[in-house]
């Protein structure tokens, strides 16, 4: 009877060790990206981030108000010298971003974030 239990435990241990990684729970971590806004460009602290929850820390170093739109979310206008945040969940892929204030994206306030 004891040998059967040992064999069963050993078999179970091998099965768990051989289980695919997708079957195991994965730790989800939030990523923070600092976005410096000036006339008329964005400077992102990271050009590529892992998929999942991402918080954008918005820092307006310019002389005009700016905002930040990515995915399905847009920040409020950030006044010169002020900061804000925008948090959302992004899937793998290329995600365009831009400032939606008239003429700002056309002047260069746009780009693409790569999400892996």
Image (cartoon, rainbow, N blue to C red):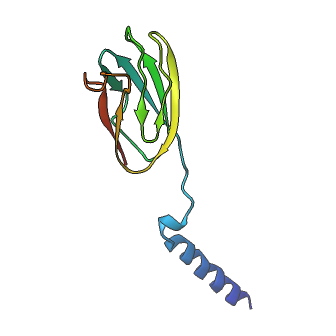
Return the residue found at the far right. 1
Q: Is residue 53 visible?
A: no
Nearest the viewer among 12 and 2 is 12
Tell me the quadrant of the picture where the N terminus can be found. bottom right
In this rendering, position of residue 54 left or right of residue 110: right
Residue 96 locus on image (x, y percent) = 33, 39
Q: Residue furthest left?
A: 107
| Residue at x 36%, y 34% (from the top left corner) | 97
Establish if 107 lies above or below 49: above
Image position of 25 (left or right of 61):
right
Answer with the quarter of the image where residue 43 lies.
Answer: top left
Q: Residue furthest front?
A: 102
What residue is rendered at 39% in x and 51% in y?
A: 92
Tally of numbered tags: 0
Q: Residue at x 34, y 22 (%)?
A: 102
What is the x, y in percent for residue 49?
39, 41
The residue at 37%/49% (across/down) is 116
Query: What percent of the width, then of the height, locates residue 100?
Result: 38, 27
**Vertical placement of 95 versus 43: above or below?**
below
| Of the pair 115 and 95, the residue shown nearer to us | 95
Please, is residue 67 above or below residue 69 in the view? above
Whether residue 39 is visible, yes or no, is yes
Q: Position of residue 105 (x, y in %)?
A: 30, 26
**74 lies left or right of 115:** right
């Amino acid at each position: 009877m004891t040998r059967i239990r040992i064999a069963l435990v050993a078999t179970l241990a091998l099965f768990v060790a051989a289980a695919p990684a997708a079957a195991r729970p994965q730790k989800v971590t939030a990523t923070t990206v600092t976005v410096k806004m000036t006339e008329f460009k964005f400077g992102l602290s990271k050009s590529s981030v892992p998929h999942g929850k991402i918080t954008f820390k918005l820092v307006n170093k310019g002389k005009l108000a700016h905002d930040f739109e990515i995915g399905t979310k847009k920040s409020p206008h950030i006044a010169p010298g002020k900061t804000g945040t925008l948090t959302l969940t992004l899937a793998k892929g290329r995600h365009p971003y831009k400032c939606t204030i008239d003429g700002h994206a056309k002047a260069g306030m746009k780009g693409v974030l790569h999400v892996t």
